[in-house]
Amino acid sequence: EEQLAESGGGLVQAGGSLRLSCAASGFTFDDYVIGWFRQAPGKEREGISCISKSDGVAYYADSVKGRFTISSDNAKNTVYLQMNSLKPEDTAIYYCATAPTLTYFSGSFYQLIDYWGQGTQVTVSS
């Protein structure tokens, strides 16, 4: 059974850093794309970043580019999101997700994604 388990959220001051982790298990194929959406109160779920398990190609939303870095440890089937220079606007619930292609994240096509983690709260204080 396909499962995602994320962790690493918390409370941090503006300018600080957090690292999120997501462990994937039970997937039939290992060529999927894995990454992160976030959802703030009253907002649509937004694709933030993802990485291809097969070739390492990564995507970043403009809102996080230059501040967030995604990486993967294929031996552990785990993806990480290093979040630096955090801003209050980054406050949201962050969800790990998998999808067939990067476009699910770049287009924020959350309605088409079947596999989600439980979410981890990131709160950035000003």
Image (cartoon, rainbow, N blue to C red):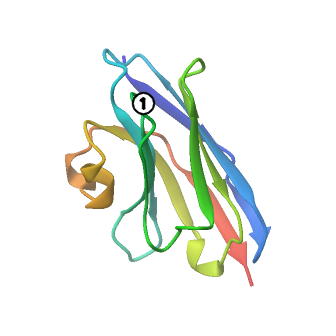
Name the secondary structure under disc 1. Answer: loop
- Check the image and report above or below for 36 versus 14: above
Rendered image quadrant of residue 113: top left
For residue 106, side relative to residue 41 (left or right): left
Image side of residue 71 versus residue 59, left or right: right
Q: Amino acid at mark 1?
A: Lys
Depth order, front residue of 81/110: 81
What is the tally of numbered marks visible in this picture? 1
Q: Is residue 124 left or right of residue 101?
A: right
Label 1, residues with CA under 10 Å away: few <14, some 14-19, many ≥20? many
Residue 15 lies, in percent from the top left, at: 77, 75
Quadrant (top left, top right, bottom left, bottom right) of the C terminus? bottom right
Q: Residue furthest left?
A: 112
* Horizontal side, residue 13 vs residue 64: left or right: right
x then y, percent, for residue 44:
33, 70
Name the residue nearer the viewer: 79 or 39: 79
Residue drawn at point x = 26 percent, y = 41 percent: 101
The residue tagged 1 is 53
Image: 75 above or below 35: above
Q: Is residue 47 above or below residue 53?
A: below
x 36%, y 16%: residue: 1
Measuring from the top left, give residue 35's x and y in whole percent.
45, 45
Q: Residue furthest bottom?
A: 126
Q: Please tell me in which quadrant of the rendered image residue 21 appears.
A: top right
Q: Nearer the viewer, residue 30 or 91?
A: 30
Report x, y in % for residue 38.
46, 61
| 48 to 123, vertically: above or below | above
Residue at the spot 47% in from the left edge and 71% down from the top edge: 40
